[in-house]
């Protein structure tokens, strides 16, 4: 088994607790599903959010979907002019047998434009 990094991003419909938790939960579940990752294979998760997300920590979604035993941290994304608003990014560290090229990084909603080189 190897340690790999799995990336993902999504956008919210606004700066509300519900929108942040909903979008982040959807992203986490999709990352796990697309890559057939069991919760016991998770090592840690880093979340970043654009500065316009202030109503809730994206990491709160991990607890909502049953990942309360996984170390998580939330941080503010760099504030770059012209950046996509209401964006949450995830870096998930996992144990997997797969090669790097076999991992399916997940970009949902408006965040798809961040990685047009990846298949959906």
Image (cartoon, rainbow, N blue to C red):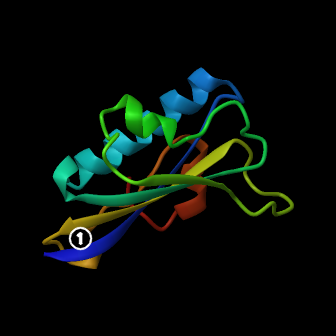
Measured as percent of width and height from the top left, residue 106 is found at 41, 53
Query: Left of 26 or right of it: where is 10?
Result: right
Query: Is residue 1 visible from the viewing direction of this image?
Result: yes
Q: Residue at x 34, y 32 (%)?
A: 65
Measured as percent of width and height from the top left, residue 12 is found at 62, 34
Query: Left of 48 or right of it: where is 102?
Result: left
| Residue 13 picture quarter | top right
Query: Is residue 36 visible from the viewing direction of this image?
Result: no
Taking depth in this image into account, of 106 and 68 the one nearest to the observer is: 68
Measured as percent of width and height from the top left, residue 107 is found at 48, 52
Taking depth in this image into account, of 117 and 9 the one nearest to the observer is: 9
* 45 over 68 or under it: above or below: below
Instruction: Label 1: state its secondary structure.
Output: helix
Measured as percent of width and height from the top left, residue 3 is found at 26, 75
Query: Left of 15 or right of it: where is 3?
Result: left
Q: Residue at x 23, y 55 (%)?
A: 35
Query: Left of 11 or right of it: where is 98?
Result: left
Count of marks overlaid on the render: 1
Q: Which residue is mark 1?
A: 102
Q: Residue at x 33, y 50 (%)?
A: 70
Q: Residue at x 70, y 59 (%)?
A: 77
Q: Quadrant of the N terminus?
A: bottom left
* 63 over 59 or under it: above or below: above
Q: Residue furthest right?
A: 81
Report crowding for label 1: few under 14, some 14 to 19, many 20 or more residues within 10 A (C-alpha).
few
Taking depth in this image into account, of 117 and 61 the one nearest to the observer is: 61
């Amino acid at each position: 088994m190897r340690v790999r990094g799995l990336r993902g991003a999504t956008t919210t419909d606004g700066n509300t607790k519900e929108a942040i938790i909903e979008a982040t939960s959807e992203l986490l579940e999709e990352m796990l599903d697309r890559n057939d990752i069991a919760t016991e294979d998770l090592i840690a998760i880093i979340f970043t959010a654009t500065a316009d997300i202030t109503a809730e920590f994206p990491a709160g979604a991990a607890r909502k979907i049953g990942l309360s035993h996984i170390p998580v941290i939330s941080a503010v994304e760099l504030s770059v002019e012209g950046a996509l608003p209401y964006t949450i990014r995830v870096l998930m560290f996992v144990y997997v047998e797969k090669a790097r090229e076999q991992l399916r990084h997940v970009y949902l909603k408006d965040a798809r434009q961040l990685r047009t080189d990846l298949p959906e």
